[in-house]
Amino acid sequence: MQPEKFYYDNKIVRNFGIATIVWGIIGMTVGLLVAMQLFKPGMNMGNQYTTFGRIRPLHTNAVIFAFVGNAIFMGVYYSLQRLLKARMFSDALSKIHFWGWQLIIVSAVITLPLGFTTSHEYAELEWPIDIAITLIWVVFGINMFGTIIKRRERHLYVAIWFYIATFVTIAVLHIVNSFELPISGLKSYYLYAGVQDALVQWWYGHNAVAFFLTTPYLGMMYYFLPKMANRPVYSYKLSILHFWALIFIYIWAGPHHLLYTTLPSWAQSLGIVFSIMLIAPSWGGMINGLLTLRGAWDKVRDDVVLKFMVVGLTAYGMATFEGPMLSLKQVNAIGHFTDWIVAHVHVGALGWNGFLTFAILYWLIPRIYRTQLYSTKLASFHFWIGTLGILFYAVPMYWAGFTQGLMLKEFTPEGILKYPTFLETTLRIIPMHVMRAVGGGLYLVGVIVMAYNLAKTMAVGKLVAQEPAEAMPLEKVFVAHNEGDNFWHRVLERKPIQLMVLSLLVILIGSIIELIPTMTISSNVPTIASVKPYTPLELQGRDIYIREGCVNCHSQTVRPFRSETERYGEYSKAGEFVYDHPFLWGSKRTGPDLQREGGKYSNAWHYNHMLDPRLMSPGSIMPNYDWLINQKLDTTTTASKINAMRTLGVPYAAGYDKQANTELDKQAKGIADNLAKDKIKVQSDREIVALIAYLQRLGTDIKVTKTANN
Amino acid sequence: MFKQFVQGIDGNQVYLITSLAIFLLFFIVVTVMLIRIKKPHADYMSDIPLSDNQPKHLNIQEL
């Protein structure tokens, strides 16, 4: 048999690399802007398109799907070809994948500031974009499996298993969390409501971290770290254990995002138990990575690429120790909803994803350009300013998290809340937020320096777009030569489709056990007779609440702690959310919880608060929402919204859609008249009226029962 | 702490026990698999990234 000559496609790797850098700078700049908005409301820039609620999802989507996403594809396209000794399956599919993905990101950049959002965290993009993501993901899958099929290396290296698990699991997560009923070109309602919607969302949210931010990066670690250190991975057996244990356990852990909520307690317990177990495979992987450098630590001293890898792996170890710890109920009670979580995710994002990406870029770009890195000094500067940036980011955020978490729980000896006003706790942590922005700024400076350094490197070198290689073709039929060749894991290593199916089964076990009972057993969500569907005006108000991204700062779930029931009112019940498509429990309290907001303040208070929050709460960091007073409510959508809700099982009477706007006008007039008594002149058809109607409804249904019972 | 878990799963033990059984079974299978992997094969697999630019055909029987 003669060796075959072929060419690796480096152009597609380069393109994804450039996209990684460009989107990284954009995503992090938006991150810096939102960080500044949290201590200087003026940074919201006085218009609706740049307020925190709309821009924060832009930051998260840009860094996760644009920066990390492109970095994944860069790493996969580089390593997959070499591990399989084959060019990518189809140049056309590679191009469609690249441009399709960039188009999806551009559509996110346009739609999110315009207020088109589903409100599900890290899945905010509306239904047409969801479909585009599915199609492009399939293109990626075909290209990857096509390459695997025409490979010249019989066995699939562990990195490729991680890529396969990433592909299959992200597909499942994305599809299940995108079951939406469209009501217009860019608006939809989720099929699930309340508790079920929350479980699906956090099953998705947690596993997006697992299978988008972790498994592909572990795959890249298993390829690039041995290449960088020029020595094989410490333990191949450990990598197998790492792979199967990680994908099996991770999928169960989602409910730890919903501790103390109305999610059934058995699901919470499962989430906790598996979160704690998760430390074993996570640390197994980290140790396998770090020990790969055994005997090469002298290289780490000189090689900036390895420095990035070591800090990245350490950050992974820290974040994956902290995750299980935060899943303990006692710790979660303090940490959840605070900046502690923000610190936690940024140790992972900046340290693990960021630093691994930088290491790969610094290693890969000079190689595909057949040149040396333009400046190792600048790269070293990037490493130190980046590390300093992470510290300046994380330490103040931990401090802010502990401070606020404990302040919110503190009682006086007399048994009343020591800090009854939420704003007091916000003002206390403003200095930490300033320091965090400094940390983020330092990190961003490092990335800009890297962009300059790599651009100079590219200018000096010349891209080897078609890199020649040769390898023997595979025998058509595999002949076992050694004892053990037919042992089933070795067989599996030769059979990509079976490996994919088995990975799919492994991730489906935990998903099915958690999701199906919550969806099907009615006792998991006890209904409450007094909970009624929203009025048409409240429904429209709720959609404004979603559009403005209020959920990014305000939760709607009161946990059963005395500190919360004293502050907010009665703790939440599962039955209260049965008409909430989507749920709006939130994950962070930059402002107070709003689950029991209804009836707490007058309509006039809400009006003035929206006009300028500082009129009612001096020192508040909430943006102004003055445009809601001028913008006319779009009532042409009312009927289709009512019909969609009916389709989803909300018990509006048949034909209600036809009278909905009449009722809407009536309720709106009532609110406008009420405001007029407080000398506030506002037309009843303005958006502010709908939002006030919604806010005044929040959490009042169970108060109706109490009044009736009394 | 264990008591808290047990109390919190009233009437739903079947889910937790099933999960525990699946979990144990899963790890027993993976352990058996790991024990049965032979060193030459493990060495071959871990060398794949380092041999990716070599034109020489490395097949398993050569080890």
Image: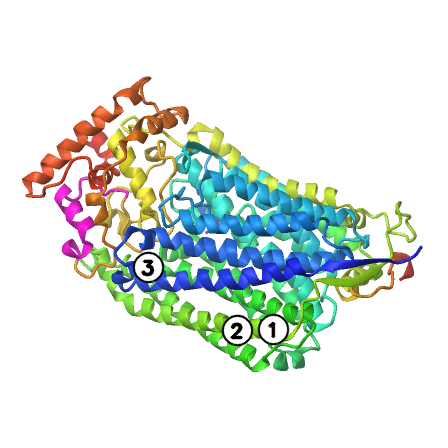
Chain under callout 1: A
Q: Mark 1 highlights which residue?
A: A459
Label 2 or label 1, whichever lies nearer to me, is 1
* Closer to us: A663 or B36: A663
Residue for badge 2: A452
User: What whole-number distance in Å separates the C-alpha atoms at marks 3 and 2?
Assistant: 41 Å
**Rendered location of residue A525, percent (x, y):** 40, 32
Badge 1: residue crowd in 10 Å (few <14, some 14–19, many ≥20): few
- For image coordinates 14% across by 32% down, the residue present is A669
Task: Looking at the image, tell me whether mark 3 or mark 2 is earlier in sequence order.
Answer: 3
- Label annotation for residue A405: 3
A299 on left or right of A585: right
Q: CA distance from mark 3 to mark 1?
A: 50 Å
Looking at the image, is mark 3 or mark 1 nearer the viewer? 1
- Look at 9% across and 43% down and name the residue there: A680
**Is residue A587 visible from the viewing direction of this image?**
yes
Q: Amino acid at mark 1?
A: Ala
Badge number at residue A639: none
- Span of residues in magenta: A595-617
The C terminus of chain A, quarter of image: top left
Taking A465 as reference, is A329 left or right? left
Q: In this figure, which colouring scheme has been used for the structure?
A: rainbow
Give the CA separation, mark 2 to mark 1: 10 Å
Nearest to the observer: residue A2 or residue A252: A2
